[in-house]
Image (tube, grey):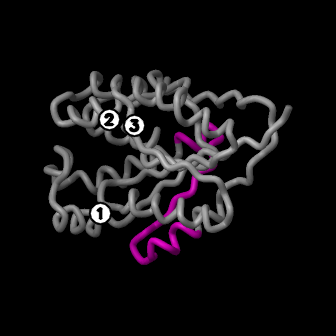
Amino acid sequence: MTSARGRFVTLDGPSGVGKTTTVHALTTELARRGWAVHQTVEPSTSAVGVFTREHFSHIHGRALACLVAADRYEHIEHEIEPRLCAGDTVVCDRYLASTLVMQQLDGVTMKFLLDLNAHVLLPDLAVILTASPGLIAERIAVRGPRNRFHLDPTAPGREVDLYDEAAQTLMTANVKVLIVHTDDSTTTEVATSIADAIPHPSVSSAAPTPPTIPQEP
């Protein structure tokens, strides 16, 4: 028996760009349009995800990258994939692009990260939210630092550049990528533009085989 498989949408971007607010607005907009929506986040709410979140400031480098990947594989198996098979559109606050940026800021090579995440489920739409480094720095200053990366004044500019690179990596893997500049847009406008870009659910009898993430030489 065939059924409509849901769409997998991920939202990533520099700290302070408004990811969580946009995720809430997007799920509201999709529900308004009559879509069945499931909202989730990484690190996930599983035991591995909670441990990762609680120790984010104390575990660094490849060890942290491995924890994040372990949580992601469990997240896919126990939450994301079942919801997609049930026909829900899954909206995830942070996913693979965040790994390719934050773990690089933490000194991990791109090759290691790509190898570690070579078998993850790739999204149907990867949204990269971005803004000017100056605006991001202002927002972080107003709300206060929430992790060790916020203590580096050069981090906003580096994050913006690395997210551009992450977008290119995903596009090379045939992932549909939507880059949204949030400087002069309201949250509602951003959410509407993302909802309009989501591919309509397809009918299939089994989960598709994930594309291979390109590997660095």
* Classed neighbour count for the residue bearing mark 2: other residues with Cα under 10 Å, few (<14), some (14–19), many (≥20): many
Is residue 156 placed above or below 205 in the rendered structure? Answer: below
* Residue 109 image label: none
Give the x, y percent position of residue 195: 61, 63
Q: Between disc 3 and disc 2, whose residue precedes?
A: 3
Mark 2 secondary-structure assignment: helix
Q: Which residues are magenta?
A: 169-192
The one nearer the camera, 50 or 117, is 50
Mark 3–mark 2 Cα distance, whole angstroms, equals 17 Å
Is tag 3's residue or tag 1's residue first in the polypeptide sequence?
A: 3
Q: State how far apart marks 1 and 2 are (Cα).
A: 19 Å
Label 3 vs label 1: CA separation?
Answer: 28 Å
Give the residue at mark 1.
133
Position of 48 relative to 146 (above/below): above
Task: Return the x and y of residue 69 as percentages of the image width and height.
Answer: 41, 27
Check if mark 3's residue and mark 2's residue have beta carbons within 8 Å.
no
Q: Nearer the viewer, mark 1 or mark 2?
A: 2
Residue 103, disc: 2
Number of other residues with Cα within 10 Å of mark 3, as a class: few under 14, some 14 to 19, many 20 or more: many
